[in-house]
Amino acid sequence: MIGFLITGTIALLLISALVAPLESLGWWAGWLGEHDPLPIEQAPDVTALDEAASDANHYLVYLSGIGAITDESIPSEELDWINMLHKRIPGTTLVADVFPYSVTNLGLTSNRLFAGLWRWLEHLRIQNTAEILTFVINIRNLLQVAVSADHRYGPIYNLGVAREIARSLVAHGYRSGSGTPITLLGWSGGGQIALGASSFLIGMLQAPVRIISIGGVMADDPGVLRIEHLYHFYGDKDPVHGLGGKLFPGRWSLMRQSDWNRALARGRITFTSLGPIAHNGPGNYFGTEVITEDGRCGAEITLNAVVNVLAQAGLLSTDR
């Protein structure tokens, strides 16, 4: 039985690796979903808008990490943290219904060939069983992050995700061309997806876009020169966030003319340590275990860092 599971897992990983770019290419060819990049203001079928949302002076889009199965099925500590964030950002509309690991915003358990398998893995994760098998979810989504960072397939993938982000923003009351600021908050792999989609999103909505990365693994994407600013938060016990600087040549210091290093030289990227925080497991960015001498947990530290940077940018009030 164990041998069968191991063999099946390896086979699934190989299949995922082979087909990783195909969803993007299929969408671009018109085989999957809609291929109608412009104009975005006419794309969403919005019958009613939230009046309060339409009056927001700032929109924040949360893009989850590679543990997500759908926009709603993400690790519980992430969900708890998002709810905490929502209470701390007055005047901001929080958008959290985008699944960043699909060019068509289609969750893994939706209308897909292997939807039954992903539902089974989702069940195992909820039951806290077979962690090795549920790790397949992470690998599958990680491959989509690699597609986003790839110079060949990335533009197609990032265009599709940007379109879905724009659709969701408009559905939540955003008015294209209004100039209302947008912040993309990407956790882990969501950091790269946010950066990849940013250039297209700016063009679609004619809006200023900022990015907040929480432990994000990011490539040298041209979007870094178009956004207002990139704020990257990392934990001192998180070795994962540093992989971007090692794996992608455009982020190497010797590549002085790369988009990333030009953005650095212009002061458009800010790195901030959050202290003794890990990427996963106990003491992570959303964890509730006390990790500092003054009694703070990772979730509180991360939350305060995000809220403070938004407040300093003049995007919200800290009165609440």
Image (cartoon, rainbow, N blue to C red):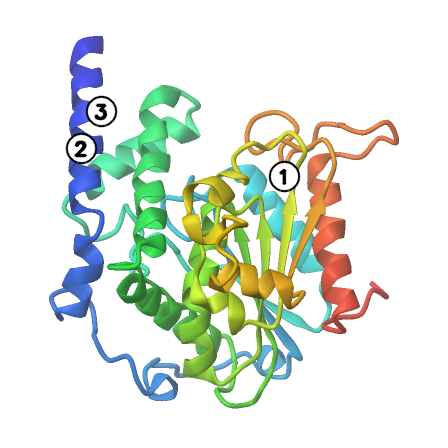
Left or right position of 41 against 264: left
**Which badge, 2 or 1, is on the more N-terminal residue?**
2
Q: Identify the residue at image location x=57%, y=78%.
A: 208
Q: Quadrant of residue 288?
A: top right
Q: In this rendering, would 144 be left or right of 261? A: left
State the image coordinates of residue 184 (x, y, percent, origin top left).
54, 63
Gap between marks 2 and 1 measured at Cα: 31 Å
Q: Residues within 10 Å of mark 1 (few under 14, many from 20)?
A: many
Say which residue label 3 marks: 9
**Residue 6 seen:** yes
Amino acid type indicated by mark 2: Leu
Whole-number angstrom distance, CA of label 2 to CA of label 3: 9 Å
Q: Which residue is mark 2?
A: 14
Q: Secondary structure at mark 3?
A: helix
Q: Amino acid under label 3?
A: Thr
Decide which of 242, 73 is in the foreground and name it. Answer: 242
Where in the figure is residue 124, as x and y percent of width and height? 35, 27
Which residue is drawn at the image coordinates 47% and 40% (left, top)?
Answer: 246
Q: Earlier in the sequence, mark 3 or mark 1?
A: 3
Q: Residues within 10 Å of mark 2 (few under 14, many from 20)?
A: few
Q: For residue 281, which quarter of the picture? A: top right
Q: Image point 77% across, 66% down: which residue? A: 311
Q: Quadrant of the C terminus?
A: bottom right
The disc placed on residue 286 is: 1
Q: Tell me, yes or no, if residue 104 can be seen here.
A: no
Residue 8 vertical position relative to residue 221 in the rendered view, above or below: above
| Quadrant for the N terminus in the image | top left
The first of marks 2 and 3 along the sequence is 3
User: At label 1, which amino acid type do we have?
Assistant: Phe
